[in-house]
Image: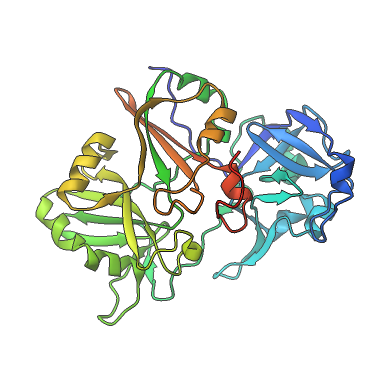
Amino acid sequence: MNSRIQVKRKLASVRRVEEISSIDETLKKKDIPGYPLNGKCLARIGGWTTLVEEGEFNKGDLVVFCEIDSFLPKDIISYLGESLKKSNIHKEKTLDDGRYGYWVSTKNINGILTQGAILSIAVLGEKVCDYKHGDDVTDILKVTKYETPLDGDCQGTKVPGFIRAASEERVQNLGECFDTYKGLMFFVSEKLNGTSVTYFIKDGEFGICSRTKKLERPAQDHHNWYWKIAEKYSLEDKLKESGKNIAIQGEIVGPNIEGNIYKLMEHELYIYNIFDIDLQRYISKSDMMARAMELELKTCPVLYESITIPDTIKDLLSMANGSSALNQRFLREGMVCVCDGDNGRVSFKVVSNVYLASKDKSLTLELV
């Protein structure tokens, strides 16, 4: 148990190309405008497979890998392959603060799944020799996580330091740590696709945080999802009555949020964490379920209360496929695995590749 490590998420890191594979010629002939396959091959890094230019990289090369949902600033785009820059594989975006760049996403091109972006190691400049496999270069390259813009009513300030961000590492990035988790018992819940939120009470003060902001209390006549949910579930009163400094973290789903893929008629809150602010730690999942019942709150759907995970990442990715508990007609985004042990918490997310590859998320796509 002492060998367990909680992995810090890295949006951009120095990695080694583990394999280069060719693309079937028959698939190249079905070239889709904006998504070129001619002159391309696939590079494998950890659990990820990414489209790159033929001859650009070789097995064993050190590169910079940027994972899904990374936002790449414009000054490093030149280190992508030339035709990839001109394609629609990565989406051009201008953020609210005026920054222009590319949003790295998943694409399914003629049945080929490409995830993440690979940049030449030269992007690290003159000190490139100072870097080694595994180094986190997220801040150095000014790569950030792309966040869906907030509702227009949402104004706010910096998230308080006593709140811990709920950001789970993707299973494909666990590397050797994954092997240390075998035999452990995990609580597994459905990963919902909405907007994350934190509701907290600290020394009598009630507050709400999105992933990036502590939100101001809006005017009485407002349409702010975050505060509407707090009112719907009487969260301010309930948390104050608890008599403890705690934070509840969850996912808001419903109309106008991420396309409302579950086809819900109104906004709903599903919690996935309760954080003890004074102790600066999450309470166990079993305790969370009990507290949620006391607070009359729903939790993210539980898939397994206690289970050992498969031996391979490939099998775990297959396990993530399936229909959503919120609407059986639609695919689930994936699952979150949590082990609360004597040496702390181990947690990671497993996003379904079937979900990522599907355009409409409906179950008309065969589950594989």
Foreground pick, 255 / 126 = 255
Quarter holding residue 151: bottom left
The picture places residue 266, in percent across and down from the top left corner, at: 35, 68
Q: Residue furthest bottom?
A: 221
Quarter holding residue 11: top right
Residue 299 seen from this side: yes
The picture places residue 300, in percent across and down from the top left corner, at: 35, 47
In the image, 181: left or right of 86? left
- Residue drawn at x 79%, y 57% is 85
- Residue drawn at x 10%, y 50% is 243
On screen, 134 above or below 143?
Answer: above
Quarter holding residue 208: bottom left
On screen, 127 above or below 225?
Answer: above
- Residue drawn at x 54%, y 70% is 96
In the image, 230: left or right of 250? left
The picture places residue 75, in percent across and down from the top left corner, at: 72, 58
- Residue drawn at x 29%, y 70% is 228
Image quadrant holding the C terminus, namely top right
In the image, 15: left or right of 328? right
The picture places residue 56, in percent across and down from the top left corner, at: 85, 40
Foreground pick, 223 / 130 = 223
Residue 160 seen from this side: no
Image quadrant holding the N terminus, namely top left
